[in-house]
Every structure is written in C-alpha cells, then in structure tokens.
Image (spheres, helix red, strand yellow):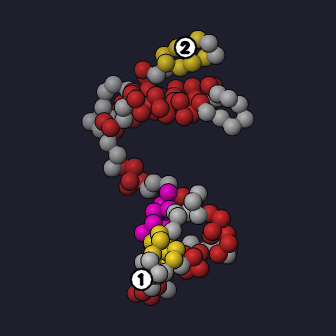
Amino acid sequence: MTKTRTASIAEAWPRLMRAETAARYLDETSVEAFRRGVGTIYPRPRKVARKGDRWLKDDLDQAIDRLTGPSETELARVSLASVSARGIDKLYAALQTGTRVERRLRQANLCMIRMARAWDAVKRLNPEVVPDPNPFRGVELEHGKATAPA
C-alpha cells in the first residue's frame, strides 16, 4: 500500500462515530464487544443533540494510546526532577495492594530496592541528566511489623 493510499484511508474516518463505526475503527469483533469495553477500556460516548451517542475519534485514539502505554519519546519528555518523595510514597503504597493477599510487602519492597539501584546506575552513567538525591533511597520499607530504609 502506498503512502498516499494509507493517508487517504486514515483521513476517511469521521471525527464523530456511531457505535458501529467506532467498533470498526477499533477493529473489534462486534459492536457488542465494543460496547462491553465502553467505560472500562474505551471512553463513554458524547451525547449529541438529535443524534444520540457518538464517539470522538480523538477520544478513541487516546484510549488506544493508554492501552499500548507511553511511547519512548513520551517517557523521554518526563523530567526526572519532577519525581518527588511524595510520588514515590504513593507508588510504594500502590505496589503493596494485592488481590489475593491484603498487602504485598515483599513485592513492593523488591520493587523499591530495584528502582533505587536503577536510579543509582543511571545517575552514574548520566550524572548531568539524573538529579540528586535518589528519591527511592528515603522510602521506609515495611517488613511485617518492622521498618527499614531502602
């Protein structure tokens, strides 16, 4: 397929789509399968006067981006200086929550220790990019009833 043919197909999708069109755009197996994903992996429709439910192409594209995760260029734009101790504490708390057990301390602790080591390794290789101090080093790791620094 040539570039002009690919570009013309991409431009052929309308900005506002009915459920049938949105399901085809997302390559879902059926409209029902698409509707089951609405509100969880896909966005809720916009209410358009005298037209009913419609999905914005931009909203669907954002949902696809969330499903596939951030690209390397998006991650590269995040400043390491914006990583705060409060954010690390929230991450540690989120890592502790589990579905089969109440608290996953061992898994959360291993993640914090590895992230602290990774920060140090990247800092050693790129000191001009990675700021001091290592925010993962100040996390108080919990071990049952006791605590220890990372």
- For label 2, the residue is 147
First to last magenta residue range: 57-66
**Residue in the image at 54% along x and 34% along y:** 94
Mark 2 lies on a secondary structure that is strand
Q: Amino acid at mark 2?
A: Thr
Residue 20 at what x, y percent from top left? 59, 79
Q: Amino acid at mark 1?
A: Glu
Q: Are marks 1 and 2 in contact (CB under 8 Å)?
A: no
The extreme right residue here reads 100
**Residue in the image at 57% along x and 25% along y:** 109
Q: Is residue 10 one of those drawn in magenta?
A: no
Point out which mark residue 97 bears. Answer: none
Foreground pick, 33 / 45: 45
Q: Is residue 111 visible?
A: no
- Image side of residue 19 versus residue 50, left or right: right
The extreme left residue here reads 128
Residue 14 at what x, y percent from top left? 44, 81
- Image side of residue 3 versus residue 111, left or right: left
**Mark 1 / mark 2, whichever is N-terminal:** 1
Q: Is residue 50 above or below residue 140?
A: below
Q: Is residue 77 above or below residue 19?
A: above
Residue 95 at what x, y percent from top left? 57, 33
Give the CA separation, mark 1 to mark 2: 57 Å
Image quarter for residue 99? top right
Mark 1, residues whose alpha carbon is within 10 Å: few (<14), some, or many (≥20)? few
- For label 1, the residue is 11
**Residue in the image at 52% along x and 26% along y:** 113
